[in-house]
Amino acid sequence: SNLRDMAGTLGLDIGGTMSKMVLAVAGESQQHVVLGGGFREHPRLSFSVELDPARGSRLTLQFVATSTDRLAEAVRLLQSRVPQVSPPARHKSLRKHWGAALEQPETSLGFRPIVTAGGGAHKYGELFEETLGVRLVPFRELAALVEGLHFLRHYGPSDELFSVDPHTGAATTVPWPSELFPFLVVNIGSGASILQVDSEGGGDAAFRRVGGTACGGATFLGLCRALTGEKDFATLIAMAEKGDETHVDTSVGDIYGPGGCSSLGMPEQMTAANFGKLAGAAVMPPKEDLVCAALTMVVQASVLVSKAHAATLGASASRRIFFVGGFLQNNAIARRLIAQAMESLGGRALFARHADFLGALGSLSESLHRQESEPSRESIACMDSRT
């Protein structure tokens, strides 16, 4: 009921593993988000935006995350206790001005509509409607991701973007590129998708998926479990930080030597074959080295494919590649390896502080746009057919 009745505008992203929520409330004060155990607030990510200075429409954005399994379990538990909720009382209609519009949530045919990215918008739609009085309005996942990035460019904090030192891993705040379009977004989740964004705005003309790879976060987890027996992501990342992939991978220098690499114009440390040294190894290297090699392989796969696509857009495009996705969450070593690989190929990797919430931010932005156009309750109810 808190999800249904809390004041403000919500954007949701219900993925296969994690669910993210962004709540926008009017004014500067932060409303404590109460959704029960297992829902983690991220107060350091909170920031204020002024969407329209002429209207004085200042909003405070708050960020909450939980596992999708936990979210679905909580809703099903409520369903078992209260089989079906009655449609909530209608709240007052949205007025045109932002601040007033966010005082109370809008309702659609007795249900509160929430724009939602991710497969969960379809998978859990009926469950949420029957149990919570919440109507999940599907918003295409990749469109939400791109919209979230545009939202951050216009309204995000000044330190939103950062690059990573390829040697130390230290993060440095960088400005948004003055020449932005076209740019690439590399979304690394279970696999990896590469989007080319040509302009601002929604629709298929603004962006398209140009490629990807099946080598992603799920590859890392599956391969590491087969090699080490470990399946906990945080534990594996800690192991990778202690490992050395050069004990596992074959480099160009291993094959050609320093002189040969010089004549080829290729760096000695460039990977020639992932896991190549295991073919002739008398003794298997430590598990930490194996995990680090698996992480390196996943990172290099995404970097190589994205750099190849950037090459078709002109020389400067290789410095406008954004790396996002759940695989990079709490994964500093992956960001450093991406920076290393991009530097070796003559490019630059860009990262965003709110990268984990791009889908939810995109959903929030779409919801605010639709509120601004003041759609009827009936049109809200069928928005999923247009997205």
Image: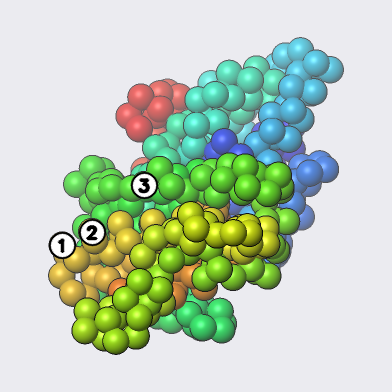
Image height check: is 358 above or below 175?
A: above
Q: Looking at the picture, tell me which residue is in the foreground, 210 or 268.
A: 268
Residue for badge 1: 312
Residue to which mark 3 is pinned: 213
Left or right placement of residue 161 versus residue 177 in this view? right
Residue 119 place in picture, x, y as percent: 50, 31
Q: CA distance from mark 2 to mark 1?
A: 6 Å
The secondary element bearing badge 1 is classed as: loop
Q: Nearer the viewer, residue 159 or 280?
A: 280
Most extreme residue toward the top is 83
Relative placement, left or right, of 152 versus 198 is right
Residue situated in front as seen by the camera: 304 or 257:
257
Q: Quadrant of residue 323?
A: bottom left
Q: Is residue 348 visible?
A: no
Say if mark 2 contacts mark 1, CB within 8 Å: yes
Q: Amino acid at mark 3?
A: Thr
Residue type at mark 1 is Thr
- SS under mark 3: strand
Mark in front: 1 vs 3:
3
Q: Please, what is the three-letter code of the amino acid marked with disc 2?
A: His
Q: Nearer the viewer, residue 126 or 19?
A: 19
Q: Which mark is residue 8?
A: none
Between disc 3 and disc 2, the foreground one is 3
Q: Residue at x 80, y 16 (%)?
A: 80
Asked whether disc 1 touches disc 3, contact meaning CB atoms under 8 Å apart, the reply is no
Neighbor class of circle 2 (other Cα within 10 Å; few <14, some 14-19, many 20+) is many
